[in-house]
Image (cartoon, rainbow, N blue to C red):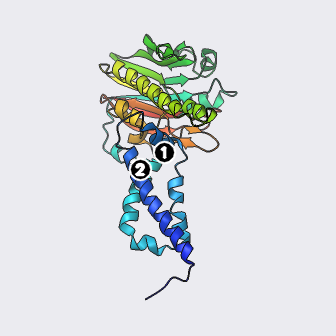
Amino acid sequence: MKYSNKPFWLNIVARTSLYFFYFSGLFVALCNIMPWSPLWALVEMPLLFAPRWWIILLLLPVVIIDRSLMVKQWKGVLFTSFFAVYYLNFQVPISNLFVNSVGQSLPIMSANLSGGIKNPAPMKNHIVNEQLVLIAFQETPRVEAEKIVPQGWDIHCIGQMCLASAYKLKYLNSQSRQVLGGYGHLGLLYQLQINERKIYVMNVHLETPRKGFEDFQLSKLNFEAIFNNSGQRYIESSLISSWLKDKAPLIILGDFNMPVESSIYRGNFDHYNNAFNVAGFGFGFTKHTRILNIRIDHILTDENFSVIKAKVGSDVGSDHNPIIATIVLN
């Protein structure tokens, strides 16, 4: 019988790390199936908005100290790794292989410009290179949007939310955040006229979870701040979802301030096609901070559209990268 020549405490560290990996995989799995609840927010929000590479780091001590553990328990490692990879949200466009591409092609973009950008050239390059016909702006005053969109485009803004299109736009309605005690708008609804077809387009900008975390820290373990923030984001998403229930064909694009794994997203938007989930490749990070990269900007369509391709655009001078998709009106 072989005995390890490593110190006993190192073996304990390796085994403990592996079991924490299993335990974390269970929590990640729960994060993807649990319905929304204010109480669940205490577990879900850190899982969703923390840097996700932490789950991979749990295997590092095992690899360094005793890789034979992974061989002996390969079934558990493989099973948990499946949830870890899903948690990291790396996309491969398998479902896009048999997509129907017959119909009117629409290259579109959503971009949160964080109040404005110093150099409009990168955004203009995206418009030309992708041959865009529709752009939804968030945190972008009209004067900033007009510096970017081509001359002759139709553009409509309320506050710092704008929709610009090469086609004729018809503004229908908007939902203010004032009903929830906030400011700005949750969404702006339009009709887009393309030949003989009328398409509904919704530009959204939902509440950020950052406020919940900030109030939690500043108030010294104020758990109520997490609950209230989660509740407000759920109400906002429910309002948008209910509002759009009978609208078709429909495109929803904007800054949702949540990843697709969120129970709030799953409860209100999971029945739509997420362009990057369908046709994107890679992690698709759209939001960047010093410690966090995450995809919270989305382009969604109903069943009247097929998604041909999707990608995250290059840096345009904002802390968000634009999300770009080419969709086909079937």
Q: Residues within 10 Å of mark 2 (few under 14, many from 20)?
A: some
Residue 2 in the image: x percent, y percent? 46, 87
Dot 1 or dot 2: first in sequence order is 2
Residue 239 in the image: x percent, y percent? 39, 20
Residue 130: tell me if it is visible.
Answer: no
| Horizontal side of residue 91 vs 291, given as left or right | left
| Horizontal side of residue 325 vs 289, given as left or right | left
Q: Residue at x 32, y 19 (%)?
A: 247
Under circle 2, the secondary element is helix
Q: CA distance from mark 1 to mark 2?
A: 9 Å
175 and 122: which is toward the camera: 175
* Amino acid type of the residue tagged 1 in the rendering: Leu
| Horizontal side of residue 181 vs 244, given as left or right | right
Residue 185 in the image: x percent, y percent? 50, 17
Q: Quadrant of residue 319?
A: top right
Per the image, the residue denoted by label 1 is 47
| Horizontal side of residue 144 vs 329, given as left or right | right
Residue 326 in the image: x percent, y percent? 43, 33
44 and 80: which is toward the camera: 44
Q: Are marks 1 and 2 in contact (CB under 8 Å)?
A: yes
* Residue 117, above or below 9: above
* Amino acid type of the residue tagged 2 in the rendering: Phe
Per the image, the residue denoted by label 2 is 27
> In the rendered image, which quarter contains the N terminus?
bottom left
249 and 83: which is toward the camera: 83
